[in-house]
Amino acid sequence: MSDLDAELDRAAAALRGATRVAVLTGAGVSAESGVPTFRASDGLWEGHRIEDVAHPTGWRRDPRLVWQFYHARRAKAAEVCPNPGHAALAKLEAKWADRFTLATQNVDGLHQRAGSQRVLELHGSLWRTRCTGCGEVAAIGAEPSAGIPPCPTCAAPLRPDIVWFGENLDPAVLGAAEEAAFACDVLIVAGTSAVVFPAAGLIPLAKGGGVKRPPGVVIECNLTPTDASRHADIGLYGPSGETLPRLCDRLGL
Ligand code: OAD
């Protein structure tokens, strides 16, 4: 039996005994769908500096460039499909229902397209805009668009409804994710380098910081160990599009 088989058995056993399950996902879960991850060695994000396209100063300097970047990301996200890892997480939600919480750092909407019903989008969504004037949040479709869209209500410039570096997460969304992480018996951490906070802070919360009895079991699903590994009890190292479906198989899902 390989190490991975043994870890899959342990993960399935932990899940069988779990009343509450929480999941934190990152870019790696969408990698097999063809969405690039973030931490490339050149420090650029699809050819752009992070501070130019994912920071309020970049927006103030050149909102047209920021929109060009997000229009292109949205177009790319519309072209790709959810992969078996997304589908496996939707199956887990169907089993645990309202005792299951999926929090994602991804903005691509692929969890929802795979059938996940209740997704906490910690970093916002490519599929929504937010008005810089009246604050209204609205859906934006997949049809090609260019330039800076105006708000249909107040005509102020719309911005992507994305949490940029230096900005706060929506407190209601973060609060719900923290509650779920603290209350869970099992936390699955999939496809994240676990270096961006406060999202990465959900992982030690699952352990209860010594307060919760018994502490949650943390299952890491990644290609390699990460900053999350020191909190992980079980490691499923391999592509999440393969390991998560194998975990579902063991649970008969
Ligand atoms: P990263 O790009 O930092 O990390 C991606 C992780 O996925 C790495 O640990 C990879 O090893 C792993 N990975 C890659 N392919 C995988 C696969 N097929 N199966 C399993 N794991 C795989 O992405 P995030 O951790 O999501 O924030 O980054 C967090 C945040 O930083 C993002 O949400 C974004 C970014 O800057 C904002 O935009 C605010």
Image (cartoon, rainbow, N blue to C red):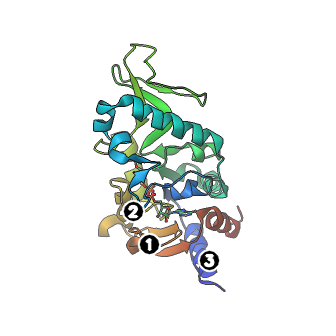
Mark 2 element type? helix
Measured from the top left, where is residue 102 in percent x and y? 51, 51
Q: Position of residue 146 (x, y in %)?
A: 51, 26
Q: Which mark is residue 203?
A: 2
Hey, which quadrant is residue 252 in on the image? bottom right
**Residue type, numbered disc 2:** Ile
Name the quadrant of the N terminus.
bottom right
Tell which of 64 and 102 is nearer to you. Answer: 64
User: Would you place residue 238 above or below residue 181 in this image?
Assistant: below
Alpha carbon distance from label 3 to label 1: 15 Å
In the rendered picture of this protein, how many numbered marks are placed on residues?
3
> Which numbered disc covers residue 80?
none
Residue shown at 33%/20% (left/top)?
133
**Residue depicted at x 60% and y 66%:** 239
Residue 104, percent across and down? 48, 50
Whole-number angstrom distance, CA of label 3 to CA of label 2: 22 Å
Query: Which of pointers 2 and 1 lies earlier in the amino acid sequence?
Result: 2
Q: Secondary structure at mark 3?
A: helix
